[in-house]
Image (cartoon, rainbow, N blue to C red):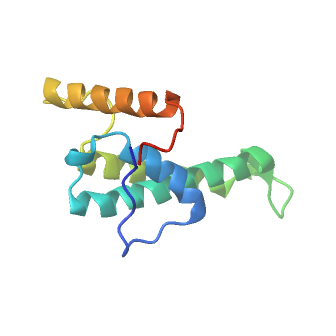
Amino acid sequence: MKDIEPPAHVHLRDGDLPYWTSVMRARTRDEWADTDLVLAAQLARCLADIENQQALIDAEGTLIVNDRGMSVVNPRVSVAEQYARRAQAIMRTLRMGGRAAGRSADAQHSRQLERTARRLQAEAPDDGLLA
């Protein structure tokens, strides 16, 4: 089962693509509206930015020494928090994350079927018969 591709008018960086795939797999294909895909791309970029900032924080430390020789909180911490708030806002707009009220049993069942189909496809031998 082929994943949904980003719309042609939306730019994703190479590092955003794993997050795009994860976001797309959070719903079944028929649950994604065209307008949702733009927000999903924004979410993928935001999640990639969070990871990039976190990697830099891990390398530099949460506390750094400023020009006066004093320990201060790394400004990247604030940037990562801003990205996290943005990601949460986009997820709320997309009604993603957690067990939201009103989530139907039908949607849960559809998601389970799609996950099962993906697993079976991954386990199937590649005999060239499936597209």
Residue farthest toward the bottom in the current orientation of the protein: 9
Please identify the quadrant where the N terminus is shown.
top left
Is 14 displayed left or right of 9 in the figure?
right
Q: Residue 61, position in %: x, y?
A: 77, 45
- The residue lying at 79 percent from left, 48 percent from top is 59
* Count of numbered circles on the image: 0
Image: 105 above or below 82: above
Is 95 displayed left or right of 39 in the figure?
left
Image: 101 above or below 96: above
Q: Residue 45, position in %: x, y?
A: 48, 59
Is 21 displayed left or right of 24 in the figure?
right
- The residue lying at 23 percent from left, 31 percent from top is 110
Image: 129 above or below 20: above
User: Does residue 65 show up?
Assistant: yes
Q: Residue 34, position in %: x, y?
A: 23, 62
Is 123 displayed left or right of 65 in the figure?
left
In this orientation, which residue lies closer to the viewer: 10 or 42? 10
User: Does residue 73 show up?
Assistant: no
- The residue lying at 30 percent from left, 26 percent from top is 112
In this orientation, which residue lies closer to the viewer: 4 or 131? 131
- The residue lying at 29 percent from left, 40 percent from top is 27
